[in-house]
Image (tube, rainbow, N blue to C red):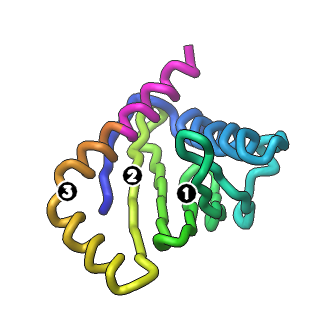
Amino acid sequence: MKVTRIGTVPIARLFETLLRSLQADYQENTGELLELQELQAGLTYIKQFGDKNQHSVGVKVLELQEPSLYRVHFQSNRGDEFITYECQALNQEETQVSYAYDFVAKDWFGKANHFLMSKLLTKSLERQFDAQLQALIRHAQEQEE
């Protein structure tokens, strides 16, 4: 599933906002601070989440091509999730950003469940992804001020 939105924000600022989010997530989960220039394809770490950090997922940055492409892989016992952000400058002040999500279940039951749920929740997921893009754009715009 893919959602695209246009924002009034320079591409470099939008992509930097994505990188800062990755930087903060890495630091929160590893306790280590990486500089923005150290963020690159191949970076891996374990992300803890849940009310008491009882869940974990492996995170691997698959592609990082500044300022246009960021692709990450989340691996858990449920399956593999792939999230891709693609940015394209429309002019000096506008950027088109796309958010793509794909899930690959580990077993037959997970595949069937994902197929059914994705059919039932397509519109809801599209709204959620659109809201994420709007929040990203808004946050990047706030960083400019």
Q: Amino acid at mark 3?
A: Leu
Label 3 secondary element:
helix
Q: Main secondary structure of the magenta part?
A: helix
Q: Label 1, label 3: how many angstroms apart (C-alpha)?
A: 27 Å
Locate residue 104, reporting x and y percent: 42, 76
- Mark earlier in primary sequence (1, 2): 1
User: Where 28 falls versus 57 (above or below)?
Assistant: above
Q: Contact (CB < 8 A) between labels 2 and 3?
A: no
Label 1 secondary element:
strand
Task: Give the residue pinned by disc 1.
Answer: 69
Q: Residue sitting at 55 percent across and 68 percent down?
A: 76
Q: Nearer the viewer, residue 102 or 28?
A: 28
Q: Nearer the viewer, residue 101 or 46?
A: 46
Q: Label 1, label 2: how many angstroms apart (C-alpha)?
A: 10 Å
State which mark lies toward you, 1 or 3: 3
Q: Nearer the viewer, residue 24 or 88?
A: 24
Q: Residue sitting at 43 percent across and 26 percent down?
A: 138
- Label 3 crowd (10 A; few <14 / some 14-19 / many >=20): few
Task: Give the residue pinned by disc 2.
Answer: 98
Quarter of the image containing the C terminus?
Answer: top right
Q: Amino acid at mark 2?
A: Ser
Instruction: Check the image and name the residue furthest to the top.
Output: 145
Quarter of the rendering containing residue 119: bottom left
Residue range of the region highlighted in magenta in the rendering:
132-145
Task: Give the residue pinned by disc 3.
Answer: 121
Q: Contact (CB < 8 A) between labels 1 and 3?
A: no
Q: Which mark is residue 135?
A: none
Residue 143 colored in magenta in the image = yes
Q: Nearer the viewer, residue 49 or 98?
A: 49
- Mark earlier in primary sequence (2, 3): 2
